[in-house]
Amino acid sequence: MVSFIKSCTIAGVDAEMIRVECDLSKGMPLLNMVGLPDAAVRESRDRLRAAILNSRLDFPVNKRITINLSPAGTKKEGTHLDLPIALSILAGTAAIPPEELEEFAVIGELSLDGRVEGVFQALPMCIGLKQKGVKKIILPRENLKNVAVVEDVDLYPVETLRQAFAFINGEEAIEPVRGKRPPSAFESPDAEENFSEVLGREEAKRAIEISVSGFHHLLFTGPPGCGKSMMAKRIPTVMPGMTYEEMLEVTKLYSLSGMEPEEGGLISRRPFRAPAGNVSLAAMVGGGSGIPRPGEITLAHLGTLFLDEMPEMRRDVLEALRQPLEDEKITISRSSSKITYPSKFMLIGARNPCPCGYFGDETRRCTCSMQQIRRYQEKLSGPIMDRFDIFVDLSAIDYDSPEWKRSAERECRSSADMRERIEKARAVQEERYNKEEIRYNSQLRGNLMKKYCGLSPEAKEVYDLGCRQLKVSLRGRDKLLKVSRTIADLEGKEEIGAEHVAEALQYRRRDGQTDDYQ
């Protein structure tokens, strides 16, 4: 007799539905699994036998059992197939009516005594099953708190194989938990750190405001202690809240990496990832043995990736960012598969002007030769530098200067004030692009730039003159227009004016130049 039950397996960021088929036939007693199971699935043979027998259920000890995981060409990995395989065996013995299994999908790991243990990546599995049309899912109770945020799905939590068996047979009732979105989907509370603590640095705050509003990439350059890292770490406090769909997408990516919130629910704050300077290539872009796992650029999806001391990072790691910054995705190729992960992040970089950090500092003497300075600055290649939209040069703080004393006395803008302006600019973009396949000004391409980045005659004159004088590349010209568009949105203007282009030009860098602070 052949029986089957629905389950799933993870393929990249999505779950692919599979059918667990069981055939019982005469022959030498044997449990054989086919359909590209990995070691974890193959090792479940003895675990399944013990779990069924210890649950006081009948195991077909005198039958040849063949388990097929269909489609056979997709690799299956993980222990979440234990429960569906056990139920398919019981259905094969007629202990469970096969028709009772048709409307359910099942995931769950079994222990030797028949308990159903929580599984890895439960959230993306349930999201994938819902997208495939499944409305009822039997899953471990331990995973309920993480997946109860998936809307319009009936979840049936079980603690033991015996309970799952009794439920399917109608011997025990389990009240379904209806998945629904959390009530706090749009909250974005302030963190303990706040931009009101940053005295002065109004030009840097303005650059951050523009960067976050349009999702532009930003590079800080300045000596040690000038506030580069301090301001970058406060960027999460001005990021707008996420929609339910964005929260679900981010939490799914973290679930794939085994980083689900311990308290359950969804990740409600936009990601902020700050990998160490010695981060490996696989850790940055994704990889590892078996099915590649998401890297830092994917974990920063819809949030911020902060790279401190960029010139000290490995060259191959930095160069690997070039394509993801353009395509907003990363494709990891293997000999037998190809997996694509999303990587739509805002890159914030920080660097010193030279190895000692004090080139151009009026208060400290630089000990580096010009050759050392040039070699240090060239560690960031031209293509990587060209991916940045905004460049901000910070000088050392002179606490005795009148300018600093005046700025310290003024009331500083708080994160809440900055975020209010940013949210207004984001709202303008969402309304403008509601019929397009983009959300931010930084995503404008081709014809969309011509449509939405119209310049006044005065702005066109400033734009052409500035591009010639700064020798801006073709990619840089597009970025200049996008930043100008964001500045106009912050000011509530539909048309890009000369003052918006002039401000955007202040954040550009002359292509091919050696930075000079003297």
Image (cartoon, rainbow, N blue to C red):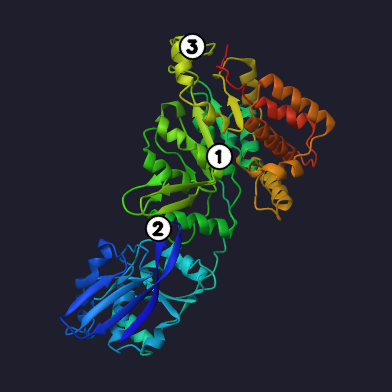
Vertically, is 113 above or below 219? below
Sooner in the amino-acid sequence: mark 1 or mark 3: 1
Q: Nearer the viewer, residue 298 or 367?
A: 298
Amino acid type at mark 3: Arg
- Residue at 55% x, 48% y is 302
Vertically, is 339 above or below 467? below
Residue corresponding to mark 2 = 262
Amino acid type at mark 2: Glu
- Residue at 52% x, 29% y is 228
Provide residue 185's location: percent of width, then percent of height. 57, 59
Where's the C terminus, which quadrant?
top right
Numbered mark located on residue 364 in the image: 3
Provide residue 56's location: percent of width, then percent of height. 22, 85
Residue corresponding to mark 1 = 235
Q: Are marks 1 and 2 in contact (CB under 8 Å)?
A: no
Where's the N terminus, which quadrant?
bottom left
